[in-house]
Image (cartoon, rainbow, N blue to C red):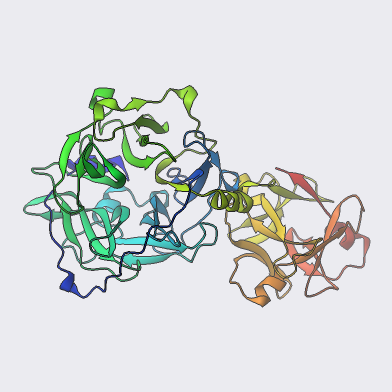
Amino acid sequence: MTHRLRRLGLGGLTATLLLSLGLTTLPSPAAAAETYAAYLMAHFTGESASGEQIYFSTSTDGLRWTDLNYSQPVLRSNVGELGVRDPSIVRSPAGDRFFLLATDLRIASGKGWDAAQHAGSTSLVVWESTDLVTWSAPRLVDVAGGISGAGCAWAPEAIWDPAAGNYLVYWATISPRNGVDKARIWYSRTTDFRTFTAAQPYIDRPGSQGIIDTQILEIPGSVGGYRYIRASGDGQISIEGSNQLLSGWTRLGDIAHLGMTGAQVEGPILHQYNGRNEWGLWVDQYASGRGYLPLTSTNLAATSTYRVRATSEYSLGASHKRHGSIIGITQAQYDRLRAKWGSGTARRVQSFNFTDRYVRHANFDARIDPNVSPLADSQWRLVPGLANAASGYVSFESVNFPGHYLRHSNYDFALVRGDGSAQFAADATFRQVAGLADSSAVSYQSYNNTSRYLRHYNYLLRLDPISTATERSDATFRLITS
């Protein structure tokens, strides 16, 4: 969430939700007996062309992070404002499903912060998955549209409420209320992240001070006598404790004694380190542009115990990490994530007869160009063929548009999002053979039009039959490690 909100002076009026609103609650499933061996961080990187999308990083110790997908997005929003920020990963109580919530916002489009705050999207963007690797298409859920004068719905989070048998979903909305126009935390209830109860006010600090970036962590067995710890941005990074979600919150302190207030940091992440009574509070150093900084503690209820980790004790990888979330993951989940997005090498496909040009996508068209910028538009993951995963068959998956593949249609090529159909798989699969013009290079024969090969013509990619020397050169490429 952006620090620009503080121009308004950000700012708990608590409310009890009547379950007679018509929401069907679910019995609380037994918590999955899982041993977490690693960590997953979801985040965005900033207001660049691709920065407001979903990025993943993994860690085995919770302090040293490795970017997945070559520091490119793993998920992109094609709904709402076409950009997402402040992602939060929510694990179901049974551990068999994950929901990823994000702010529907793309400042890189040039709309400006004032419009984003006061006339922005009132919807959240939601993905869901059973394995953290295969995700649904994104969908919009309008959680704040019923709030009078609502200007946005930012930094969504959710936590399972066993007492109610549903999820408490909460976020920040700027709106006028009781004569004061400022950011407050609102909440709703859901069991499926599709149907939500009407928004209710959750946290509303007195006066003109608004509040943003709230995150709640449930503490197994409690800490300092509290089952839940809450961090929020309200001019400080304030820490609170309670034994129930909607009421009973006690302010425990902040991190101003460490030289960090809302003027320096925002976007707090709370998480527990695997297998031990130690917790992390990560804060986004937005004012200095340095991204996240880890603080750790063995007692989150005592802010005096928080320790700032030295730069030698942590590493954030290559990408700039902004407001996100961290969860513990099993070894199997870690291995799947690494196999999907963290292993192998990104490739560039160099033209054999125009060696300064590479296969790239541009506005979802496919062509060969020199001096490709951004470079990721010409980076590909060569994956087992979607229609035939046998050795020698490949599909070209875009690195910066994951889930999108080079596909031929009417003998023309485009970058297209996979739809899971057999036709798509066949159109996006090729047999890698010795180069038609040079056996030390490679050529790509169509899987479902075996008389035709991938080639360039007037710098555009086509699927053509090959007979002449020029055509053989046009259909020959070299794979270059990025």
Q: Say whether residue 234 is visible.
A: yes
Left or right relative to 257: residue 58: right
3 versus 403 height, above or below: above
Q: Quadrant of residue 426?
A: bottom right
Give the residue at x 53% y 50%.
73
Q: Is residue 356 left or right of residue 251?
A: right
Figure quadrant of the C terminus? top right
Tell whether 247 sits left or right of 263.
left
Front residue (pair 322, 227):
227
| Figure quadrant of residue 145 | bottom left
Q: Position of residue 423 (x, y in %)?
A: 67, 77
Question: Which is nearer the eye, 27 or 179?
Answer: 27
| Residue at the far left in the pictured view | 178
| Residue 139 vertical placement versus 186 (above, below) | below
Percent position of residue 469, x then y: 93, 60
Can you give x and y, in whole percent of width and height, for residue 258 in the image? 28, 23
| Residue 373 visible in rendering | no
Residue 17 location in percent, x, y?
16, 64
Instruction: Kindly indicate the quadrant of the structure image that contains residue 431.
Output: bottom right
Viewer-proximal residue among 82 and 71 = 71
**Horizontal side of residue 364 vs 345, given as left or right:** left
Residue at 45% x, 39% y: name it.
321
User: Total label count?
Assistant: 0
Between 100 and 38, the one lying in front of the other is 38
Residue drawn at (78%, 71%), measured in percent from left and top?
447
